[in-house]
Image: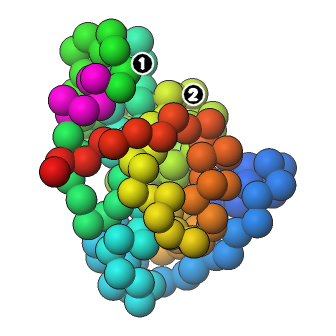
Amino acid sequence: MTAQTGFDAVTGYLERQGVPFEIVEHERTESAADEARAAGLPPDDVAKTVVLRDESGYRLAVIPASRRLDLHKVRDVLGEARGLRLVTEAEMASDFGDFEVGALPPFAPMVEAVELMDERLLDHDRILCGGGDHQHGILLDPLDLVRAGQARVADLCED
């Protein structure tokens, strides 16, 4: 599928969920920090989706672009997370082919995953998250992200 198809899937999902959002089109970027710069936003206002896997399946950890994920905290939140690890690009390409590698949107029901969201994102009125490709971001209320992603909120970042 093309990147546009992944982006269309994201916007269609949000529309079906009744989530108000704004599309932010920007130059092609390869990281959440670069997306923040391209969109003219501070990295704290941008969410990045870190894809993990354990014996039970995929997990999405949504954290501020300015922070680093703490796998120990994620394990504590998940409890029985045997073999928890970051996924490879090959796994992402194979299992999430509708989306560009590295641009998975933070909406777990779209990809049959469990979602965790860092509590720091709730400190913002609106956050920018991935739109399924490297040229579009989705600006929305973080509470809508929790709802649309069916996310559990916790402290997930390194101190």
Q: Residues within 10 Å of mark 1 (few under 14, many from 20)?
A: few
Q: Residues within 10 Å of mark 2 (few under 14, many from 20)?
A: few
Residue 117 shown in magenta: no
| x 33%, y 10%: residue | 80
x, y (%) of residue 93? 38, 41
| x 51%, y 49%: residue | 106
Residue 73 shown in magenta: yes
Q: Is residue 124 left or right of residue 79?
A: right
Q: Three-letter amino acid code at disc 2?
A: Glu
Q: Three-letter amino acid code at disc 1?
A: Gly
Confirm whether residue 30 shows in the render. Answer: no
| x 50%, y 28%: residue | 114
x, y (%) of residue 155? 33, 42
Image height check: is 96 above or below 103? above
Residue closer to the observer: 115 or 155: 155
Confirm whether residue 28 shows in the render. Answer: yes
Image height check: is 51 above or below 82? below
x, y (%) of residue 148? 67, 46
The numbered disc on residue 57 is: 1
Q: Which residue is mark 2?
A: 112
In terms of image quadrants, where is residue 40?
A: bottom left
Image height check: is 8 above or below 16? below
Tell whether label 1 touches label 2 (CB within 8 Å): yes
Q: CA distance from mark 2 to mark 1?
A: 9 Å
Secondary structure at numbered mark 1: strand
Secondary structure at numbered mark 2: loop
Residue closer to the observer: 154 or 15: 154
Magenta stretch in the rendered image: 71-76
x, y (%) of residue 113? 51, 28
In terms of image quadrants, where is residue 6?
A: bottom right
Residue closer to the observer: 123 or 7: 123
Dot placed on the residue nearer the N-terminal end, 2 or 1: 1
